[in-house]
């Protein structure tokens, strides 16, 4: 019997578990998955909670609903991986050995990385929406807030779902407009990037959206600290932005277990081959989802495209062949723009988002880089798709690699 | 293709205006790029960063981020901003003759 061990039962780990379970021969393979928690969160839904569009029940389900029969599920914290010994130590003292390891421990926010961020005002006037706790606390706050300076701040890149902060800004504009409060709320978007987004064409388009929605953009701003007393954020080069309500996207880091294992970079992300998804320096360890250091977006859709590639490469490696499938960095993200509309972007390592139709060239139904109602429905359908298709690892009639068909250069 | 004269030599530039060839670089060229970026003289602390960046790039094929710089070059974030105002990672990469850090998406 050979042991396949999966660390982390979030989006990527659960997807891989289901894929392997339906294709590996059970008389030869023992499949085990480890996670510290029993609840699965639909993280993309966190965006909608502050505005009362979703409630907690929209975004939680028991993890066990997505575990197939006949696999070993261990609920425990991972202490560390000992990659040279092919072993994993758990926090309860147990030890697991593996023949092949898949790391899917994701990324999480680390507000203590910034001076004063987790200070007196934390969850009073300063909130995140990248955790269920933050999203719920912010939702509560917004129920009675009468307006003032709303500042949305990205601490540093990379962050998971890099479009989420922009979506938050657009939805806030729409939310306060509908509450007849928009003229009392000044919205400022403060980012360490030089524009609204990283990719030039999308950045220009999204920058125009900010302007049209009367959202002020402060760019090239790297936050050094929060002044809780005077309600200001201060950059390393000593620029200041005042706030009454600060919505922060704190530094995102890989799990501490990765640091304890000595396998991470300066943010605990695991150096991973950007094409094969094999951990640098280890032939029997694959990494998927937010845990990697790949220069692709940290998103569920990306993990989904990676899953197909990882699976094929795993089969090759198992047979002693060279891993031949190459991940191209494919990402596909719906961006909510408020007032029931959305934009869709599709891109990879090499090609920035371009206009066109998706997934069927010329037909759509989704429009790339264009604001439509249909794209908003796409975003809302994603929840159903996530719970019913994506987590179950079902093959889709959609290619993992990005396609240029139907796109305009 | 864009070219520019630095320290008496015509050099090729990439799309971001950084040097195209790692080997075209020398200390005089670094000084010339620095003064164009508004840094009048390069101190020992500047050189500590520049030398670290070139070493990292040659080993890893990517210019380090600010976080990595502050963790490993011996110069903390505050000082990095003082030495290379307005985006230390980008600016220090340019002066070091490296492409813009790939950063993230
Ligand atoms: C606000 C927000 C909006 C988003 N919007 C979108 C969107 O619109 N579209 C999209 O595609 N993606 C979106 N995402 C991103 C998406 O949710 C993530 O990219 C995806 O969940 C990553 O999956 P993962 O498996 O890598 O990590 P996760 O799903 O986070 O799973 C990691 C798992 O590992 C476990 N774990 C970690 N460390 C340990 C340990 N030491 N011991 C035991 N268990 C451990 C955790 O408990 C967790 O269950 C959004 C994210 C956020 C926060």
Image: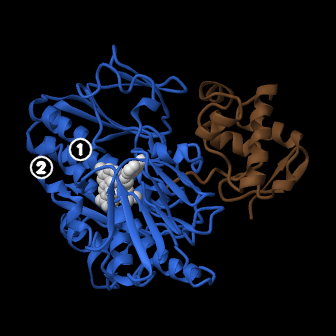
Chain under callout 1: A
Chain under callout 2: A
Residue A92 percent location from the top left of the image: 39, 45
Q: Nearer the viewer, residue B45 or A43?
A: A43
Quarter of the view holding residue B72: top right
Depicted A34 relative to depicted B81: above or below: below
Q: Nearer the viewer, residue B42 or B75?
A: B75
Quarter of the view holding residue A363: bottom left
Who's the residue at 20% across and 33% down the image? A185
Instruction: Label 1, secondary structure: give it.
Output: helix
Who's the residue at 23% across and 25% down the image? A124
The residue where tag 2 is placed is A55
Q: Earlier in the sequence, mark 1 or mark 2?
A: 2
Q: Nearer the viewer, residue A111 or A40?
A: A40
Who's the residue at 70% across and 45% down the image? B93
Residue B67 percent location from the top left of the image: 58, 38
- Colour assignment, chain B: brown
- Toward the top, the furthest residue is A229
The quarter of the rendering in which ligand 1 is drawn is bottom left
- Colour assignment, chain A: blue
Tag 1: Cα neighbours inside 10 Å, few (<14), some, or many (≥20)?
Answer: many
Residue A95 percent location from the top left of the image: 47, 53
The residue where tag 1 is placed is A132
Mark 1 residue's CB less than 8 Å from ligand 1: no
């Amino acid at each position: 019997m050979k042991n396949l061990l999966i660390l982390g039962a979030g989006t990527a780990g659960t997807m891989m578990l289901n894929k392997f379970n339906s294709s590996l021969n059970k008389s030869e393979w023992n499949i085990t998955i480890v996670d510290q928690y029993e609840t699965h969160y639909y993280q993309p839904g966190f965006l909608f909670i502050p505005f009362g569009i979703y409630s907690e029940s929209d975004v939680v389900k028991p993890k066990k609903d997505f575990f197939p029969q006949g696999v070993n599920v261990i609920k425990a914290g991972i202490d560390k991986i000992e990659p040279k010994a092919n072993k994993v130590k758990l926090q309860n003292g147990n030890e697991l050995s593996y023949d092949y390891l898949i790391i899917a421990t994701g990324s999480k926010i680390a507000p203590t990385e910034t001076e004063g961020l987790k200070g007196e005002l934390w969850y009073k006037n300063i909130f995140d929406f990248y955790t269920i706790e933050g999203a719920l606390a912010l939702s509560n706050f917004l129920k009675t807030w009468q307006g003032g300076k709303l500042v949305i701040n990205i601490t540093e890149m990379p962050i998971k779902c890099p479009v989420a902060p922009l979506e938050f800004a657009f939805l806030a504009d729409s939310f306060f407009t509908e509450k007849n409060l928009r003229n009392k709320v000044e919205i400022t978007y403060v980012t360490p990037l030089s524009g609204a987004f990283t990719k030039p064409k999308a950045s220009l388009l999204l920058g125009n959206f900010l302007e049209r929605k009367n959202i002020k953009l402060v760019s090239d701003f790297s936050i050094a600290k929060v002044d809780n007393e005077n309600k200001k954020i201060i950059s390393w080069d000593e620029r200041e932005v005042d706030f009454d309500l600060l919505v922060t996207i704190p530094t995102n880091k890989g799990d501490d277990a990765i640091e304890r294992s000595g396998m991470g970079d300066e943010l605990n992300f695991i150096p991973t081959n950007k094409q094969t998804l094999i951990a640098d320096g280890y032939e029997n360890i694959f990494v998927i989802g937010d845990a990697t250091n790949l220069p692709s977006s940290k998103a569920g859709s990306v993990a989904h495209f990676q899953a197909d590639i990882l699976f094929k490469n795993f089969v090759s490696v198992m047979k002693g062949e060279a891993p031949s499938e190459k991940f191209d960095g494919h990402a596909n993200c719906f961006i909510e723009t408020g007032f029931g509309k959305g934009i869709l972007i599709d891109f990879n390592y090499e090609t920035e988002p371009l206009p066109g139709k998706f997934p069927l060239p010329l037909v759509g139904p989704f429009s790339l880089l264009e604001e439509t109602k249909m794209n908003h429905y796409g975003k809302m359908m994603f929840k159903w798709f996530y719970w019913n298709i994506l987590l179950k690892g079902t093959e889709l009639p959609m290619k993992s690699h990005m396609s240029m068909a139907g796109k305009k250069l | 293709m864009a070219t520019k004269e630095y320290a008496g030599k015509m050099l090729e530039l990439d799309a971001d205006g950084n040097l195209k060839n790692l080997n075209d670089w020398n200390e005089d060229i670094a000084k010339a790029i620095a003064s164009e970026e508004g840094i009048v003289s390069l101190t020992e602390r500047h050189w500590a960063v520049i030398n670290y960046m070139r070493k990292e790039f040659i080993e890893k094929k990517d210019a380090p981020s600010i976080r990595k710089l502050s963790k490993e070059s011996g110069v903390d974030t505050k000082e990095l901003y003082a030495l290379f105002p307005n985006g230390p990672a980008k600016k220090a990469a340019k002066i070091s003759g490296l492409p813009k850090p790939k950063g993230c998406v």
